[in-house]
């Protein structure tokens, strides 16, 4: 009896099975984390949190361009000290006044950019300030401020406390919306209508922090709170945009005239 044996298939070794498994289920490569991630956008609150409530938001805005803001603060401080100790040198005082004006322009620009999460270095800020039209408009606005304050004080003081808080946003609107001095005053007056209490709240906090400068911590608080009026502008702008959008959505739409299917031509 003939003994027939069938060939035995070769068995896969463990190493071969492992390689086959790895090839049949390829792994998805994990992307490396990005080093330069975009900064998180700064959003305004839906309701006004109060003068003290915006402290953390102002701190976040200031810290976004902290090195530039600190540099401008130091330049302004040096200009002020130099002007105080050089009272007899009018030319020096004039130069320091111009420097302070330019620093103010640069500071406003940096704060407006910071609230929009835009980085600004000191060279960009100074370059922006070294513009005759911008500095001239701010100087003209300062003159208008002086005359308005002077005449409102003459009117038994009371109008001063009614009018001046309504105009505090003018320097920021001057550069944010590229306005002239008169239009900036009008824009500030319109924007603060019905919101004078918010302005007075910010002014009260600034006065409180100024009183704390005797213990040095007030200096830090004043610097961190620099963006308070910029926050108020952005908050009121957001409220107005929301209100306008709601009004437009609720307004009745004009009927659209129907187009006839066929138009007869009279010859």
Image (cartoon, rainbow, N blue to C red):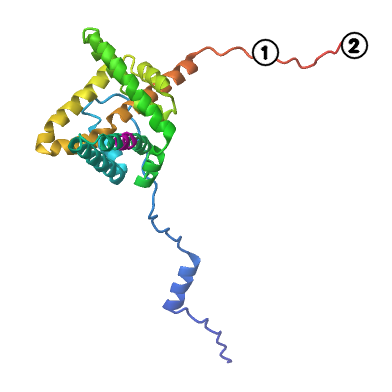
Q: Which of the numbered marks, if any, corresponds to residue 73?
A: none
- The image quadrant that residue 202 belongs to is top left
Check disc 2 and report the residue beneath it.
267
Where's the C terminus, which quadrant?
Answer: top right
- The image quadrant that residue 113 belongs to is top left
Residue in the image at 39% along x and 17% along y: 186
Q: Tag 1's secondary structure?
A: loop
**65 w.r.t. 158: above or below:** below
Where's the N terminus, which quadrant?
Answer: bottom right
Q: Badge 1 local density, few (<14 within 10 Å), some, or many (20+)?
A: few
Where residue 172 sits: x, y (%)?
36, 28
The answer to whether residue 92 is seen in the rendering is yes
Check disc 1 and report the residue beneath it.
257
Viewer-proximal residue, 157 or 16?
157
**158 w.r.t. 120: above or below:** above
Where residue 20 sits: x, y (%)?
48, 71
Write the start and end of the magenta stretch as one range: 98-104
């Amino acid at each position: 009896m003939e003994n027939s044996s069938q060939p035995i298939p070769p068995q896969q070794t463990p190493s071969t099975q492992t390689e086959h498994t790895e090839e049949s289920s390829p792994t998805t490569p994990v992307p490396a984390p990005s080093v330069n991630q975009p900064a998180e956008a700064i959003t305004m609150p839906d309701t006004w949190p109060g003068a003290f409530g915006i402290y953390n938001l102002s701190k976040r805005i200031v810290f976004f361009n902290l090195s530039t803001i600190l540099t401008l603060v130091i330049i302004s401080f040096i200009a002020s000290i130099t002007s105080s100790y050089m009272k007899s040198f009018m030319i020096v005082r004039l130069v320091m006044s111009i420097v302070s004006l330019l620093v103010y322009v640069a500071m406003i620009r940096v704060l407006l950019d910071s609230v929009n999460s835009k980085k600004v270095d000191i060279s960009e800020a100074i370059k922006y300030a070294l513009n005759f039209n911008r500095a001239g408009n701010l100087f003209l606005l300062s003159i208008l401020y002086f005359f308005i304050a002077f005449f409102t004080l003459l009117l038994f003081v009371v109008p001063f406390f009614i009018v001046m808080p309504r105009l505090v946003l003018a320097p920021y609107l001057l550069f944010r919306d590229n306005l002239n001095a008169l239009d900036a005053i009008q824009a500030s007056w319109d924007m603060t209508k019905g919101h004078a209490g918010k302005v007075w709240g910010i002014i009260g906090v600034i006065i409180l922090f100024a009183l704390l400068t005797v213990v040095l911590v007030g200096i830090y608080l004043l610097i961190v709170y620099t963006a308070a009026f910029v926050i108020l502008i952005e908050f009121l702008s957001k409220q107005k945009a929301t209100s306008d959008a709601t009004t437009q959505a609720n307004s009745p739409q004009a009927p659209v005239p129907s187009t006839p299917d066929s138009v007869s031509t009279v010859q």
